[in-house]
Image (cartoon, rainbow, N blue to C red):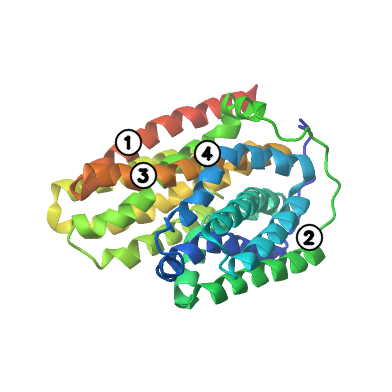
Amino acid sequence: MNQSAPHLPIRTPWALIAALYGAGLLAAGQFAKISLTLGPLALAYPGWPVAFAVSGVAVMGIIFGVMAGGLTASIGPRRAILAALGLSALAGGAQALLPPFPILMALRVVEGAGHLVLVVAIPTLMAGLAAPRARGLVMGLWATFFGVGFALAALVIGDQAPPVYAVHGALCALFGVLLWWMLPRAAVARRAPPQLSDHLVIYTNPRLFAPALGHGIYAFLFLAAVTYLPTALGALWLAPILPVVGIVGSLGAGVLARFIAPGALVACGFGLMALVFALGLVWPAGAAGLSVLAMLISGLVAGGSFAAVPWLNQTEDTRALANGALAQLGNIGTFAGTPVLAALGAGASLPLAIAVGVFGALVTAIAYRAAILVNVR
């Protein structure tokens, strides 16, 4: 693995950063387009388990997240992004034809591979393009891609599945052409193709797995809390607000990362979040407002985790591996959090949030401390 210090950009190419972020919004749309058209899909495929068309992408992330990091490190982010957008365009366009359900699921698996490569390769490249002073802000911006993409999709998606899938596929093709023209054709330091041993490389090196650890714990709580807190607290007005304040917190993390080490931001964010949720448990009358504050703080964890990848890893290939782990543990957290809270019951929302915050603060503090010691050596 090449460990030489990279050339540091002096200026951040914001137009290219914006285009890459737009491609990230399309990656979020790969989840949103199915989630928001489940009704029409159920009518098109009566008797079939259409909900699996959503979770199939998450399963791909759980199984192949690290492999996507290895692939990006092997062929370089530019090639990985262009290939993933091409794959997504083809799969999305074919989905618009509403083929038989087994074929639709196969197309979702193909699209899941494209999604996975995008969410690994885009932040890897964005971190390399950003000037050092702007890197935390760029990573904080990237941390908002899923929430912003899902919110935008909810605003524009109609009630007919085929046009939604066709437009999404066309946008993937359009961004593929745009980024083919905009992305620099930098030389790629060759690395061995991805292999199962990459898991051992990553999960024995805290520089590579510490950001993913915090992100996975955050993802476990976030979707579950957004789903159940409004009901548990008898405040349904929280439903549209909690995701938005999480996005604001992630952007705030990008600014704070210029002054506070991302690892400290993550560990302290977990601790503060647990404290605020605990105040809500002992003061039920203020629980709803305190939950808004706690979810704002949780955004610091999300943004700090993404900012920690380039903070701990100075080369493009190590960042790709770290982002692969981040995708894998993030998908595990998203996949597991909601079912766990559903099994415990909505009334367990605040106690679970407190427990997750305390656990996250402890384990990420240990992991980032170990990562710093590895860097020192």
Q: Residue at x 60, y 40 (%)?
A: 64
Mark 1 and mark 4: span between their CA atoms? 17 Å
On screen, residue 177 above or below 112:
below
Numbered disc in front, either 2 or 1: 2
Residue under numbered circle 1:
358
| Mark 2 or mark 3: whose residue is earlier in sequence | 2
Visible residue check, residue 359: yes
**Above-or-below relation of 22 to 195:** below
Measuring from the top left, give residue 364's x and y in whole percent.
45, 33
Q: Which image quarter holds the N terminus?
A: top right
Other-residue count near label 4 (Cα within 10 Å), few / some / many at <14 / 14–19 / ≥20: many
Which residue is painted at 49% across and 45% down in the image?
331
In this view of the protein, can residue 314 be seen by the observer? no
What residue is disc 3 on? 337
- The x, y position of residue 124, in whole percent, is 67, 48
Residue 212 circle label: 4
Q: Earlier in the sequence, mark 2 or mark 4?
A: 2
Query: What kind of residue is marked 1?
Result: Val
Mark found first going from the N terminus, 3 or 1: 3
**Residue for point 21% across, 59% down:** 231
Residues marked 3 and 1 touching at CB (< 8 Å): no
Q: Is residue 4 above or below residue 86?
A: above
Q: Which mark is residue 85?
A: none
Along the line of sight, which residue is nearer the eye, 241 or 12? 241
> Is 82 above or below relative to 44?
above
Q: CA distance from mark 2 to mark 4?
A: 27 Å
